[in-house]
Image (spheres, rainbow, N blue to C red):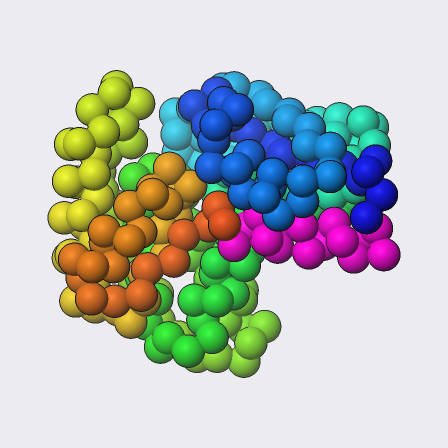
């Protein structure tokens, strides 16, 4: 790979873009020579939560981020927010740079063998796009599955207020309830990823998270572009 190859990460909040973030760690490990650019609109996630949907305004803002990444010379764009999937679908039609969703690989993996997939979330607006993506991957794989959802209501607000322990307990409780109905659990947000091992141990079912598999997917596409 050329040392000038670059990957642009799109963010919808300031919460997860610090230099020590798990996404940065994965990208640094997987593609140390690539130039990683970060593009953030810090209020998009909050707007999606307020509106209860990905509004035309939020879609336009994400398209602008993708266009800015393209203008900056990115070889691949990596969307780090699961809540804005519909906006990324629009952006894919308007830029020439490939865009990888953070949960593309996770959802594809979930439908490989499971007949019932559980989607666990702490932000309500993340459930519809994640469910839709699971169903899209299932159709592409020719799999007939069922999808169950579980919202850990209020947990994300608890996390942003700084009470990580309470957030974690709420997520674990939600996972235990969901696990009785499904074969595999997907964690709909990157903010939940660090809990995957603890949840898997608690429920005895496979638990998939998006940051690592998403980063691997983005780097695979980046390598394909460079090749």
Q: Nearer the viewer, residue 166 or 127?
A: 166
Magenta residue check for 226: yes
Would residue 100 appear left or right of 47 to someone viewing this image? right
Looking at the image, is 41 positioned above or below residue 173? Answer: above
Would residue 143 appear left or right of 28 to someone viewing this image? left
**What's the residue at 58%, 44% (across, down)?**
29
Q: Judge whether residue 47 can be spotted in this image.
A: no
Write down the quadrant of residue 97 in the picture: top right
Q: Is most of the magenta stretch helix, strand or loop?
A: helix
Residue 172: where, in percent of width, then height? 18, 48
Looking at the image, is 105 positioned above or below residue 2? Answer: below
Circle count: 0
**What's the residue at 45%, 71% (across, down)?**
111
Residue 20: where, in percent of width, then height? 48, 27
Q: Nearer the viewer, residue 48 or 179?
A: 179
**What's the residue at 61%, 32% (across, down)?**
10
**What's the residue at 42%, 78% (across, down)?**
113
Q: In the rendered structure, which segment of residues is drawn in magenta? A: 213-227
Residue 149: where, in percent of width, then height? 29, 56
Would residue 22 appear left or right of 223 to someone viewing this image? left
Residue 42: where, in percent of width, then height? 52, 19
Pick the quarter of the image with the C terminus.
bottom right
Q: Nearer the viewer, residue 161 or 165?
A: 165
Q: Nearer the viewer, residue 95 or 207?
A: 207
Magenta residue check for 100: no
Q: Judge whether residue 18 can be spotted in this image.
A: yes
């Amino acid at each position: 790979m050329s040392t000038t190859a670059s990957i642009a990460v799109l963010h919808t909040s300031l919460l997860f873009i610090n230099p020590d973030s798990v996404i940065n760690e994965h990208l640094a490990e997987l593609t140390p020579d690539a130039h990683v650019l970060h593009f953030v609109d810090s209020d998009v996630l909050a707007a999606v939560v307020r509106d209860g949907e990905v509004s035309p305004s939020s879609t336009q803002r994400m398209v602008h981020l993708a266009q800015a990444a393209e203008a900056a010379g990115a070889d691949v764009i990596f969307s780090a927010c699961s809540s804005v999937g519909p906006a990324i679908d629009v952006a894919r039609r308007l830029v020439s740079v490939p865009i990888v969703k953070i949960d593309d690989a996770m959802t594809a993996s979930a439908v490989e063998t499971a007949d019932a997939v559980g989607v666990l979330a702490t932000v309500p607006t993340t459930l519809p796009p994640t469910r839709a993506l699971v169903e899209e991957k299932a159709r592409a794989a020719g799999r007939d599955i069922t999808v169950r959802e579980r919202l850990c209501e209020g947990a994300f607000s608890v996390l942003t207020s700084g009470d990580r322990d309470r957030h974690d307990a709420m997520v674990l409780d939600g996972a235990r309830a969901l696990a009785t109905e499904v074969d595999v659990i997907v964690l709909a947000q990157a903010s939940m990823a660090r809990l995957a091992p603890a949840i898997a141990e608690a429920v005895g079912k496979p638990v998939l998270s998006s940051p690592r598999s998403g980063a691997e997917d983005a780097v695979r596409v980046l390598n394909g572009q460079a090749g």
